[in-house]
Amino acid sequence: MITQDLHSQLELRWANIKEKMDKKNVNAIILSSSANLFYTAGRVFNGYVYIPLSGEPLFFVRRPLGLIVGNIIYIKKPEEIKDQLNRLGLSIPKTLALEADTLSYNEYQRINAIFPDSKKENASILLREVRSIKTDYEIEKMRESAVKHAAVYSHVEAVFEEGMTDDEMSIELETKARRLGNLGIFRIFGSSMEIFMGSVLAGDNADTPSPYDFAMGGEGMDPSLPVGANGTVLKPGMTLMIDMGGNFTGYMTDMTRTFSVHELKSKLAKDAHNLSIAIQDMFKKEAKPGVAVKDLYQMAIQMVKDAKMEKYFMGHRQQASFIGHGVGIEINEIPVISPRSPHVLEKNMTFALEPKFVIPGVGAVGIENTFLVTENGIEQMTKFEEKIQELF
């Protein structure tokens, strides 16, 4: 059931989408990915959302049965969409946008064949641009997630035991998160990345390269999901990096904190961690609407070079080429904070900043927080102790 408040939000999102459609000369879009269905319909279903430039959206549903919200039309196959448009007296769009980045080849070709005379554009790019600017409603949902996200991290010290493994710690935190209402799913844009509820990296496992485009790697527990905890026993002197996802509302926050097993004696690791915080402080000073994120990236890289920490930054054996990313319904939205990023900060964008380091023989250090771009700067949404915390 869609509440009046949510319906008002959906109308605002539809208007934002149509504004972008008008600028790109798109007459209609068809959406079917879970993230975009949730964004435009307020729930996930099996079917399609059809948004014309003029008029209200139509929801073509296969499953589940029993939805009674207005503008729902039940269909058995996508070919019925065109017939229904004709029945309603709606014109066939001259330019139709499809989710080219997420549809399978067969699905894309099937829908393309239904509208052979319509010029095709990419709806994936259009929706990612619209979704990067959050509404007040979405921001509040992210704030809710941020509070519960921090509560999960406060559980680390309580569950730590001598001789436990990284995967045992991960299980404890996953359990805590689920009890706080975590939905247990983390949507990721693209087909080449997979992750469970987050990543717990102990010691040198943080230096294990992963096939996924994440800041940190990890061997994982099985070759079928080669990322994160691998059964490493937590031993004195190593670091423990906790990077769990915070999805409690359908809108995610991203946060990383570093712990050490007993006292951390490595000065290099401590210095690197402090540099991570300093990079974040620089962002708090320099990031604001109108600033190109590639310029912020270069400022961060210069700080790393000045500290002679390049070979440890964003990995050691394998380094990531970004230090931050948008976050919301998916964990990797725009803007992407990288050296060649075309993105410019805008008010109500939300992004995660994660300047991290891997120190061989010690493990990963650094922090990650989710930020909201405000009119005059950025606001930190995820709040939890940022210094390295010792576990005994």
Image (spheres, helix red, strand yellow):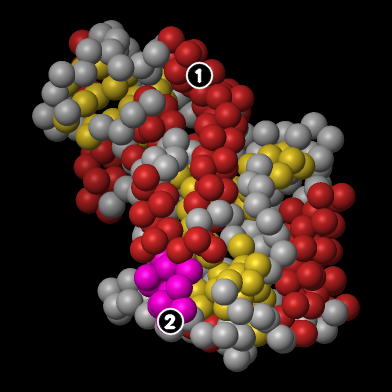
Q: Quadrant of the C terminus?
A: bottom right
- Circle 1: element type: helix
Q: Earlier in the sequence, mark 2 or mark 1?
A: 1
Q: Which residues are magenta?
A: 160-170
Asked whether 161 falls inside the magenta stretch, the response is: yes
Question: What residue do we see at 45% from left, 63% from top?
Answer: 159
167 shown above or below 345: below
Q: Is residue 144 left or right of residue 63?
A: right
Q: Any mark on residue 118, and which?
A: none
Mark number, residue 9: 1
Q: Which mark is residue 163?
A: 2
Q: Quadrant of the N terminus?
A: top left
Viewer-nearest residue: 296 or 196: 196
Q: Is residue 130 left or right of residue 211?
A: right
What residue appears at the point 49 percent right and 29 percent down from the top-left corner? 26
* Residue at the image position 39 percent from the left and 40 percent from the top: 181
Check residue 273 for magenta coloring. no
The kind of residue on which mark 2 rests is Gly
